[in-house]
Image (cartoon, grey):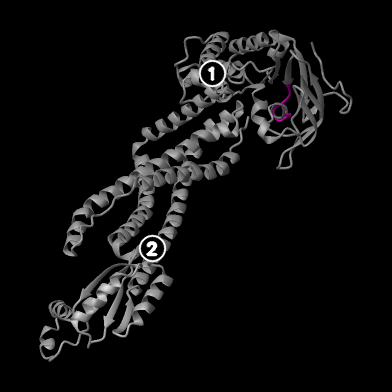
Amino acid sequence: MSLGVAGARHVQALLGSLGRLVRNPFATALTLLVIGLALALPTALRLFVINAQAATGGFVNAVDLSVYLKTDVPLAKAQLLAGSARERAEVADVTLIPADKALEEFRTYSGFGAALEALKDNPLPHLLHVRPRADASSAAALESLRRYFAAWPEVDLVQIDSDWVRRFNAILEVLRRLLVMAALLLGAGVLAVIGNTIRLEILNRRAEIEVTKLVGGSNAFVRRPFLYTGMLYGLGGALCAWAIVEAAVALLGEPVATLAKLYGSRYSLQGPSRDDITTLLGGGTVLGWLGAWISAARHLRSIQPRA
Amino acid sequence: MITFDHLSKRYPNGREALTNVTFNVDRGEMVFLTGRSGAGKSTVLKLIALLERPTRGTVLVNGKNTGTLKARHIAAFRRQVGMVFQDHKLLLDRPVFDNVALPLVVAATPLKEIDRRVRAALDQVGLLGQERSLPLELSVGEQQRVGIARAVVSKPPVLIADEPTGNLDPDLSLEVMRLFRRFQDVGVTVIVATHDLHIVREFGQREIVLDNGRVHGQAVDSLPSLVATR
């Protein structure tokens, strides 16, 4: 069989399958919707994880050190210390937060303003907010930096603000695991839906399959249109899922932007990337093909021609 | 062309359809397979078309042993055997052209070639011009001829027919049989199972008589175990 003839047969099978789907628009639409919903869920979950990461992205990678000076260190000395801290090679930036300013902020934001009025002195120390360079933010480098500052006689306490980062990353990890589980379960669901749809179609076309085998149609020939049908279901379902996800992103975009603005961020919701879409469409097609293949292998064998 | 050698066939339900059947059909020969219903005629044809495998003994068709042929070669094997059925087994939702073209389509014949050969086959059975008709728009005799066109369109070396005239009146039956003999004339090996003894006598071809799963009137293990009535 020449390549051209083989190609023509595949195109023929593909068009035949497409035609069959188009001729039953209602049944086809229902199947596509079920597959679309099943594929949309893991896609949406993945977008959620990506967006959560992006929304907090600035913090996740930059871990800061809070260097609390002793309360008896005067502001001028604190400024000197900030200056020398800036000279360290591993340090990207140092912000001095004077005790007065810290108290001011605390009064404004904590809601304990009245209670603080009762205090005679400012109980807060000056604080150096140290941001290490990106290449010096490994756990070991941070630890050595922490020890360096802790050794200064004026320093009371050095805190690495990594606890919440670790918690946040742990939450993301849970979400990622959930995403994998959802993808596996719903992928199996898609296989079952497509497998069952193909099974019904095989039973419907039993007579045709019998006659085709009778006149010498090979198993591959008989199977081919069903594999294309499965692939079309998978691809169509993935396109549905894409539409569902894009619609959800469009609907959520504005409220999320408003929410971000309230937090002083210019963050906006990200839709699926080109890679995400490629994965979705490719994955849907492969699932469709696989579901059809499993079903066809099982049910076509049982149909043998009888004279 | 076709050799049955001490062939026995037992179905899974335990019924022994053929017992120790031995005969030979030469290339280009036309043979009638006769006998009462249930004598085993259909089983002989099923064994030739590899719709069934032998239980004991061997069946050789065009040099191929149907007992040992691998499953993946069955499809290609069946393309060597054209089959005609009493109920013609046409696809009723497809036009005549598609029905006749099916053996060529499964054999990956180029489209132009399919078009040419389907027309040639329809011409041979006198149905040229009916390509777009649906089978149910045709008479019973015409449907049977569509089935014959489908059986010969890929020019198989062997043509088998199971009661091809069972639903036809005598005139149409004769017409169909003449058609088969025309294929024999061009070198096709033809085996027709029938219980229409008038036809068999009319055509005077060799006859293999089956009775209760055995070739009638012959010692079961002598090789030329055929009843030749010319």
Q: Position of residue A303 (x, y in %)?
A: 58, 38
Q: Is residue A293 above or below residue B154?
A: below
Question: Residue A153: which quarter of the image?
Answer: bottom left
Judging by the rendered image, the residue that carries numbered circle 1 is: B110
**Magenta segment, prevailing SS (helix, strand or loop):** loop
Residue A269, position in %: x, y? 25, 54
Circle 1 sits in a helix, a strand or a loop, which is it? loop
- Name the kind of residue labelled 2 in the image: Asp
Name which quarter of the figure residue B7 lies in. Answer: top right
Closest to the observer: A95 or A56?
A95
In magenta, the rendered stretch is B34-42
Q: In the displayed structure, does residue B136 sit left or right of residue A112?
A: right
In this rendering, would A158 be left or right of A189?
Answer: left
Camera sees residue A17: yes
Disc 2 chain ID:
A
Q: What's the CA distance linking mark 1 and mark 2?
A: 65 Å
Q: Residue at x 54, y 8 (%)?
A: B123
Can you give x and y, in whole percent of width and height, for residue A61 in the image? 34, 64
**Closer to the camera, B218 or B91?**
B91
Task: For label 2, count other residues whose C-alpha is less than 10 Å away and answer few (under 14), some (14-19) or many (20+).
Answer: few
Q: Badge 1 local density, few (<14 within 10 Å), some, or many (20+)?
A: some
Front residue (pair A206, A132): A132
Name the chain letter of the residue that bears numbered label 1.
B
* Residue A270 part of the magenta-drawn span: no
The disc labelled 1 sits on which kind of residue? Pro
Where does label 2 land, which residue? A135
The structure residue drawn at horizontal position 63% and vertical position 10%, both measured from the top left corner, is B179
